Amino acid sequence: KDFPNHQRYMKPARFIGRYQTVEKFPLVLFGDRYVPGMLNSPGQGHHVEGEVYEMDDECLAQIDFLEGLHEPDGYRRQMIAVKSIKRGKPDRIQAYVYLLDPQLIKDRRSSYLRIYEKKDASRYELRMKD
């Protein structure tokens, strides 16, 4: 919530809760625009925290387009196990995440992050429209 692209793409989605990956993944900022990216390198990095949403197929298709699934160097959507970070809620579910091939990251701007925070988002620059 309250991050770049959220209002534009996530309005129809229903917030489920805050979760973290069961397996460790590297989350980094990269490129001139300080884009956040979780890398497809399971076992490295941290148990990444984030928000889980329920959405319809139309909303999912918009997110797929945003994340560049149609591009050779875009993200790849993958189902992984996540668990609730809320105490006393042993909730473990499967959720889609968007992962990047680590070989595509040429200009890494951060160490491995556990969570993408507002301070990180403050450096993010939206793509310019053509």
Image: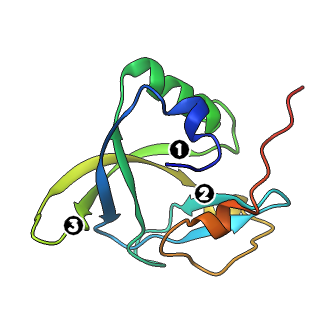
Where is residue 12? Give x, y as percent.
Answer: 42, 25
Q: Residues within 10 Å of mark 3 (few under 14, many from 20)?
A: few
Reading the chain from its start, which is encountered first: label 1 or label 2? 1
Q: Which residue is mark 1?
A: 76
Residue 56 lies, in percent from the top left, at 36, 22
Circle 3 is placed at which residue position?
Answer: 86
Q: Residues within 10 Å of mark 1 (few under 14, many from 20)?
A: many
Q: Are marks 1 and 2 in contact (CB under 8 Å)?
A: yes
- At horizontal 70% and vertical 45% (from top left) the residue drawn is 73
- The answer to whether residue 99 is above or below residue 54 is below
Q: CA distance from mark 1 to mark 3?
A: 28 Å
**Residue 29 appears in the picture as rendered:** yes
**Image disc number at residue 36:** none
Q: Give the position of the C terminus as an image quadrant.
A: top right
Q: Indicate left or right for 47 with 88 as reference.
A: right
Q: Which mark is residue 101?
A: 2
Q: How is the image coloured?
A: rainbow
Amino acid type for the residue under numbered disc 3: Lys
Secondary structure under badge 1? strand
Percent x, y for residue 24? Answer: 39, 73
Q: Left of 85 or right of it: where is 114? A: right
Near-viewer residue (31 or 116): 116
Residue at horizontal 29 percent and vertical 52 percent from the top: 17
At 32% across and 58% down in the image, what residue appears? 18
Measuring from the top left, give residue 123's x and y in whole percent.
76, 63
Please name which of the two marks, 1 or 3, marks the residue nearer to the observer.
Answer: 3
- Give the mark nearer the N terminus: 2 vs 3: 3
Whether residues under marks 1 and 3 lie with C-beta atoms below 8 angstroms apart, the answer is no
Looking at the rendering, which quadrant does residue 86 occupy? bottom left
Badge 3 marks a residue whose secondary structure is loop
